Amino acid sequence: MLDFIIRRLIAIIPVLTVVAVFVFLMLRLTPGDPAAVIAGDNATSDQIADIRNKLGLDEPIWTQFVIWIGNILQGNFGESFFFKKTVAELIAQRVEPTLALAICTLVIAVAVAVPMGVLAAYRHGSLVDRFVMGFSVMGFSVPVFVIGYCLIYVFAIELGWLPVQGYVRIGVNFWGFLERMVLPSVTLAVVFVALIARMTRASVLEVLNEDYIRTARAKGLSNRVVLMRHALRNAAVPILTVIGLGIAGLIGGAVVTESVYGLPGLGRLTVEAVLSRDFPTIQTVILLFSVVYVVINLLIDISYTLFDPRIRY
Amino acid sequence: MSDKMTDTKRPVLEVRNLSVTLPAGADRVNAVEKVSFTVNPGEIVCLVGESGSGKSVIAFTIMGLLAKALKPSSGEILLEGENILAADESRLRELRCTRMSMIFQEPMTALNPVMTCGLQIDEVLATHTQLDAAERKSKIIAILDRVKLPEPERIYASYPHQLSGGQRQRIMIAMALVLDPVLLIADEPTTALDVTTQAEILKLIAELQEGQGTGVLFITHDFGVVAEIAHRVAVLRWGELVEMGPTEKILSRPEHAYTKMLISSVPSIHPVHRGVRKDGPTVLRTEKLGKTYSASAFFQKARVVKAAVDVDLDIRKGETLGIVGESGSGKSTVARCIARLIDPTGGKIFLGDTEIATMSAGKLRPHRRRVQIVFQDPYRSMNPRITIGESIIEGPMNFGLKRDEALARARKLMETVRLDPNSLDRYPHQFSGGQRQRICIARALAMEPELLIADEAVSALDVSVQKQVLELLDEIRVRLNLAVLFITHDLRVAAQICDYVAVMSKGRVVEYGSAEQVFGSPRDDYTKALFAAAPGRNWEFGKFAAA
Amino acid sequence: MSAITPEEIVDSASIAAASTKRKSLWALAVRNTAVIFGGAILLVMLVIAILAPFLGTVDPTRIDPAARNKKPGTEITFRLDDGQTAKRVVLMGTDSLGRDVYSRVLYGTRVSLVIGVAVAVASIAIGLVIGLVSGYVRWADGIIMRIMDGLMAIPGILLAIALVSIWRAGLITVIFAIVVPDVPRVVRLVRSVVLSVREEPYVEGAISVGTPTWTLMFRHILPNTVAPLIVQGTFIAAAAIIAEAILSFLGIGIPPEIPSWGNIMAEGRTLFRVFPHNIFFPGIFLALTVLAINIMGDGLRDTLDPKMSKKV
């Protein structure tokens, strides 16, 4: 087991290296002088020279990379030229809303989608199945911000049940926090429900065709026991996998959702950074999200052992 | 079983006039057509038939586990007098595993991989009895012991993947018999197992059913198994029961033409005297041929699998050398090394005078023509997207033959393998399995090879088709004076087609000699055990004239 | 002699009876209700895109300060180029610069369809080449797959955002930015098909009759990738249309004067509470188009590539 974790940790090194190289090269791939790009359109030549100096842009590219990666490994992500803060500080301020949004979304999505998928598979070909599949296609097709605005229009503007936008820190006012979390999480959960419900359905359907399900039925077990005890646990691994891969979509969706609902999270920070061409921030955010994504998938990989004894490490 | 005993007791299973309808658009209306038979207590009844005969459909109908597309349309199934075809789902659930049980063909997939074996049997007891946990556990340990599994406590806590195929089938049998049902349905329970394991499982089933007086409905396609285990036999063809009677009578005095044909097609386990000539030039010789797979990973010991070790073989022109062995013995590895579909890791392969074991892919290409291979699975051996004609002429055209010459050759070869030359423009899916295997032989022959490798080439075929393909192969060998390397797990097939036989076990050749010598007086212990396990070895299947 | 002679095996009746299932796959796909339904909606969108100038639209970039923020159905008076005035009803209202939303939405169809097709074609073309190399050239496989794994570790939209932030926004850069995250997925698909088909006995059969590598690839392996790639292509197109809308909506997509659905919605964000039509109309068009493609993709997958239906 420990062996396996260590091996998996080693296996993510090349992946993260590629990510780091990409993020590093991002700036260098820009047409023109990176320093000028960072400094913005109205910068003086002194400012540009200053940035050039700070980033060590005159060094050979290998040296630059080593210095850059060295800084990052020490937790020094550079300084935002736009926000006039260190990037680390900036990110620390913005983590909470994004984390809260992601967790709420995941909880809602899994709680809704897994039963939906199981039911659809169990009643394969029935009206319930068609409804679930229909909902799932819709979920994939309506962009997150359209869903967001529809929900705002109905629940916040027309019915007035919930606040339109904004964020309250969880420590400041829990009820206010919750109130403002409902719509964004539901919005973001829609795609996720579509994804997980579909995978659950497909996975359970596949398992239901397995020989051991036939054996279970030949034992005289009831349909419910066959489904819950034999089918679902065997279907768990692909479902978990898709949840892990879906984290990428969740991160992307968070960027949009935060913009729609005015949540001051990392997603909004990303957009603001891009609009102001604040490269140190963009680089760090991408790096951070990628690491989170890779690590979550690593954890999911490890969790497979709980569901399937055949996966031996 | 004595006839008296069956007279005094009422049958445990009575199938009367059973018909099962296929969905619209199938090749026939009924999967099963007006089938009637009985199984008495303590009796083993074999349902025999080739693929598509409806034998498994009958088994699943009895258990009520039929796929939704199939519908029983008439008849009755009486289990101890109760018509279970009319029973509702909850009644069927009560009967399953208590009065009737079933074991399946694939022990590898029939058990839930994420549950321990003990718990899977425990479910049966928990569902159907009021026993408490301790009582259930002791009952399970007892049945595990009865099916002769070593260390029942350890097996109880094991997951299926930790057990061998034979052990898993024992678990299935334990699960099926733990509540002493009156009827056991066994659907090809030994087909997926090696011959030695098969013999053990057959013995176990016979012992257990005799002890408990269980009626067994045993489904098989293998007449060797029938001869080994059955009291009575029912022969099925296309859903119809063509003949039924005591085993001895059906096997020695069949009445129906189809039964006669089937039994005549079973190859004898005694090799025919073939008058081997010792003077032909050597076509293929291997010298200490070896193939080792090693998988290495971080923080893990490299796992080394020796698939073939020091294999020395030689084949002369006009000879057939058979390699027999159980799964994992390395016989296919050797064949694939010789065809250079995989690269050997040691030793030499001489094709005539050319050493090809270490030849680079580029240099090898001209020599590819000289060795051709026919694979096991007739459904995957041809590109489904191109016509069979294109498949056959591909090789010759690679070696510079003009298209029309290649086509002319293909037409001739189609006649050689007894297929209509005008069907060259058809696609593989339009042919049956046996026909496709003939096309594959034609494709191989189109290269005018010196050595033809048949890698389990008849294993996927029904026995009657198998016989035809075997006859064809032998005829071609004689006519073209070909060297043939014949890989098979089926001793009967090997006995009929091979001049020489190499027996492989765990990657090594354990015995090598003329077929007569190896079959007649085996020296190696493994070979002896292998032959002793061959089902129906004491039964000489007659050759009957067609009616 | 047995009852069934080998001669009887040549039974043309039985050969003919085996229906020509394989060939009719495409015919089957075309008859699938989902494919027809999705295809019909798409066809309507395509007609709208082509005929946009003739469907009662005006110049979608024309700014009219006098007609700002009109609700749908309002009649406005506007000045023609020759100085005369005319009246027209704005079906979907106008935006905060007085541009006609109806015209912008209709012209927006063009942008979305172009993006969908371009991204699907480009990512499949690039992914196919890399995937074939990866599946075929052993030493390259490791390197390529590590790079692909790395690219896949960056969430797609973020990668696209990063790329548009490097190059100044424009239609081509947006297309390219959406293509890059899709390529690894195509590569993986192609590679897995190549690797599994390579193991098929018929490919080994072709190798043993001395078929050269290129023929092997194009004749025996490549055709197997067509069906899964077409299916994948439809899903890529759908996702690309959404991705463009997201980028434009966030204000980092194609330049705001170009009428794309995302841009119209981005423009309508600030005044959403009062004038929701700026978001709803393009939103409906966007959702409908993507829905049509997805439905078609599901239908294609069910008929062309049943094995893939298991995956999402």
Image (tube, coloured by chain):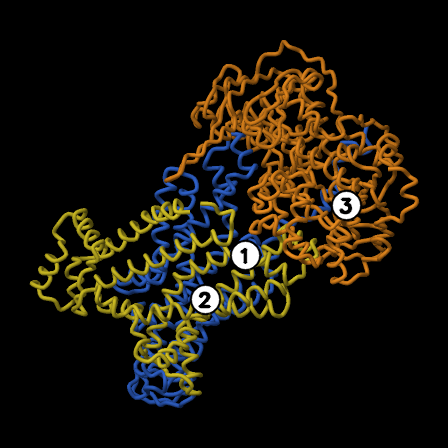
The front one of B383 and B537 is: B537
The residues tagged by marks 2 and 3 sit, at their Cα atoms, a distance apart of: 46 Å
Q: Amino acid at mark 1?
A: Ala
Where residue A281 appears, x then y in whole percent? Answer: 23, 63
| Residue located beneath label 2 in the image | A192
Q: Give the residue at x 68% y 40%.
A: B147
Q: CA distance from mark 2 to mark 1?
A: 18 Å
Q: For the residue carrying disc 2, how many other residues have a C-alpha within 10 Å: few (<14), some (14-19), or many (20+)? A: many
Is there a contact, CB below 8 Å, between mark 2 and mark 3?
no
Could you tell whether A260 is left or right of B410 in the image?
A: left
**Number of numbered callouts drawn:** 3
Residue at the top extreme, as displayed: B279
| Relative to B430, B14 lies left or right | right
Q: Which quarter of the image is occupied by the N terminus of chain B?
A: top right
Residue beneath disc 3? B55
Disc 3 on helix, strand or loop?
Answer: helix
Q: Of the residues tagged 1 and 3, which is closer to the observer? A: 1
Q: Quadrant of residue B317?
A: top right
Instruction: Point out the residue furthest to the front here.
Output: B134
Q: Is residue A271 depicted above or below C70 in this figure?
A: above
- Name the residue carrying label 1: A235
Chain identifier, orange in the render: B
Nearer to us: label 2 or label 1: 1
Amino acid type, callout 3: Lys
Q: Colour of chain A?
A: yellow
Q: For this rendering, which residue is in front, A119 or C97?
A: A119
